[in-house]
Image: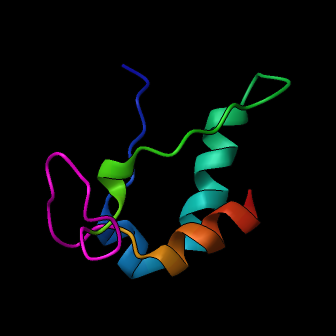
């Protein structure tokens, strides 16, 4: 269906910078701009206690800052 997703395993194996670069490449294909949002559900609950559905092994605050710098 043309959907691309990246998992925490992708981040662990390839690093956040590589995953973000690939995500931008996929998202920007055929477009002039890309709009980026951050859903708190992706953040590890240790770094965002106010999550509605906290699941372990999310992104760390350091990974999020690094991803935003790559973007």
User: Residue 3, percent across and down?
Assistant: 40, 29
- Image location of residue 50, percent across then percent down: 26, 56
Nearer to the camera, 31 or 34:
34
Q: Locate the N terminus and report the quarter of the image it occupies.
A: top left
| Side (left or right) of 50 relative to 30 | left
Seen from the viewer's position, the closer of residues 67 and 13 is: 67
Residue 66 coordinates in the image, percent (x, y):
64, 74
Q: Residue at x 26, y 76 (%)?
A: 46
Does residue 53 belong to the magenta stretch? Answer: yes
In the image, 38 versus 70, the foreground residue is 38
Marker count (numbered): 0
| Residue 41 visible in the displayed image | yes
Question: Residue sitting at 81 percent across and 28 percent down?
Answer: 33
Observer-nearest residue: 15 or 44? 44
70 above or below 41? below
Horizontal side, residue 64 vs residue 50: left or right? right
Of the 4 image quadrants, the one containing the C terminus is bottom right
- Residue 71 magenta: no
State which quadrant residue 58 falls in: bottom left
Question: Can residue 15 be seen at all in this image of the molecule?
Answer: no
Query: For the magenta stretch, what is the residue range?
Result: 45-58
31 lies above or below 61: above
The rendered magenta stretch, by its main secondary structure, is classed as loop
Using the image, determine if residue 58 lies above or below residue 38.
Answer: below
* In the image: residue 65, left or right of residue 43: right
Residue 60 image point, x, y percent: 41, 76
Q: Quadrant of residue 5?
A: top left
* Rendered residue at 72%/34% (across/down): 28
Q: Farthest residue toward the front?
A: 50
């Amino acid at each position: 269906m043309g959907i691309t997703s990246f998992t925490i395993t992708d981040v662990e194996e390839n690093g956040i910078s590589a995953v973000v670069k690939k995500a931008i490449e996929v998202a920007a294909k055929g477009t002039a701009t890309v709009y980026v949002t951050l859903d708190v559900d992706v953040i590890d609950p240790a770094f965002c206690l106010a999550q509605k559905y906290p699941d372990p092994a999310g992104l760390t605050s350091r990974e999020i800052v690094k991803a935003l710098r790559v973007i």
